[in-house]
Image: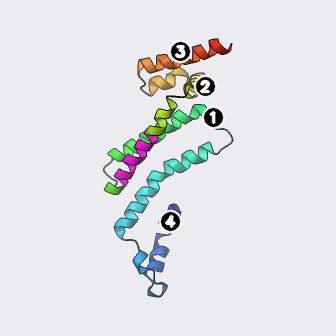
Amino acid sequence: MLDFAVEHREPLNTIMGDREMKLRDYKLSEEDWRIAVQLCNILKIFKHTTLFFSRSTPSIAMVIPAMDHIDAHLATAASSGIYSVAIKAALAIGKHTLNQYYSKTDHLEVFRIAMVLHPRHKLKYFEKAGWQADWIDEARSIVETEFKRSY
């Protein structure tokens, strides 16, 4: 919807400015449009992630990399000087919410097992992502323990 509004800005401004339509109170200012464009750009990462996980091929091993990708996107945008104060506040809230969900993956071993067993990720993903050595060791230990328990 926001994409549509940004894409059709000129016709919307015309309609909102038409006295007979009685919508002048709803006409967006230049600052409002600037924020709408910024918000549209920020929200694309969530749209792409939603579409990715809506496909028939997503796996549990892709959850942590997707969360890391979103986190990096939000952090980069928050530190950028191009976004308005309102957008930066929304980014901080979004990052906080994402971190709450991310911390929940710590309590479910399935995420780490899936990552370690995934042919593309293995333990290298954790190393590249900058995980602490003891966290990586714990991930390895979880997989080994589960293997011994199950087989």
Q: Which residues are magenta?
A: 87-99
Q: Residues within 10 Å of mark 4 (few under 14, many from 20)?
A: few
Mark 3 or 4: in front is 3
Residue 70, horizontal then vertical, whole percent: 47, 42
Q: Which residue occupies the foreground of this view, 32 or 148? A: 148
Looking at the picture, does residue 118 appear above or below residue 21?
above
| Labels 3 and 2: the sequence-earlier one | 2
Residue at mark 4? 7
Q: Name the residue located 48 percent from the left edge and 16 percent from the top edge.
A: 137
Indicate whether residue 90 is drawn in magenta. Answer: yes
Mark 1 or 4: in front is 1
Q: Are marks 3 and 2 in contact (CB under 8 Å)?
A: no
Looking at the picture, does residue 58 appear above or below residue 36?
above
**Amino acid type at image mark 3:** Ser
Residue at mark 3? 141
Residue at mark 2? 118
